[in-house]
Amino acid sequence: MNTFTINSATCNKDGICAMACPSGVIQMDSPDDIPRPALNFEDYCLNCGHCTAVCPTGAFSLNWLGPGQCPPILKELALSEEETEQFLRSRRSIRNFKDKPVEREKLEKLLEIACYAPSAKNNQPWYWTVVEDPVETRRFAGMVIEWMRSVIKQTPEQAQLRAFPRVVAAWDAGDERICRGAPHIIVVHGDKNYGFGAEDSALALSYLELYAPAIGLGSCWGGYFYSAVNGCPELFEALGLPPEHRAFGAVMVGYAKFKYQRLPLRNAPRVSWL
């Protein structure tokens, strides 16, 4: 049974775990009682770990997650306001990569951190396909180009709006603008009928892209690539995606060729205050 246990010797009965539970399935019968699972706990628990993470005394243990399994949040690692601003503003979309593959352990770490992104009801719906071989990355980029050529023939106006002729012309001239010379492409995909797949996957890719510079990597959203995955059955099949899935995004990953020195400006927020 998926429930929880309380260490009655250390529980201070402050009720924080019950208040923090997003599903409201932790109950306290009175201020003098320790928390207990509601009758519908198993049905509605999101397995988010809020209860274990928020308990100030470490008294709360889910059956699958105890406080000892959760690394503590170290105050000395907290970013200052200025550090956080620079961290967020300094992330760049990288389109120039070194001719150097990324070590698998770094790719694995990117995906590990990406999976800490929020998702609707903590469903974590994402699946990942990593093109690790740079030769395959180039081959798949060529498949995207061939798909673009077919779109140009079939719906030229739509292709023009999406700048396909320009991208194909660049390819023919030796300039690869699909994966931009990145050694790797990572595709996130999931159940095509799940209502929050696109939003959840975009959040996961955002985590991935924000973390990449911390381990010396650059990344960029591969819009042409993931559009082609869903539009080109041959590419979809070549990537080995399940037929019930849909690609929700893709990022190119590698070592950045250049180091950026300044923080460009962006448009001011367009806000309506109510």
Image: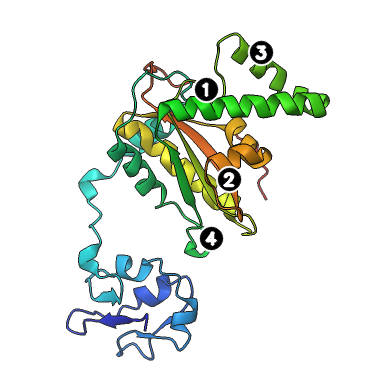
- For badge 3, the amino acid type reads Ala
Sequence-wise, which precedes: disc 1 or disc 3? 3
Q: Nearer the viewer, mark 4 or mark 2?
A: 2
Sequence-wise, which precedes: disc 2 or disc 1? 2
- For badge 4, the amino acid type reads Ala
Q: Secondary structure at mark 1?
A: loop
Q: Quadrant of residue 196?
A: bottom right
For label 3, the residue is 169
Q: Nearer the viewer, mark 2 or mark 1?
A: 2
Q: Position of residue 131 (x, y in %)?
A: 44, 36
Q: Where is the N terminus found, in terms of image quarters?
A: bottom left
For label 4, the residue is 120
The foreground one among 96 and 93 is 96
- For badge 2, the amino acid type reads Phe
Query: Is 107 placed above or below 7 here?
Result: above
Sequence-wise, which precedes: disc 1 or disc 4? 4
Q: Position of residue 99 (x, y in %)?
A: 37, 18
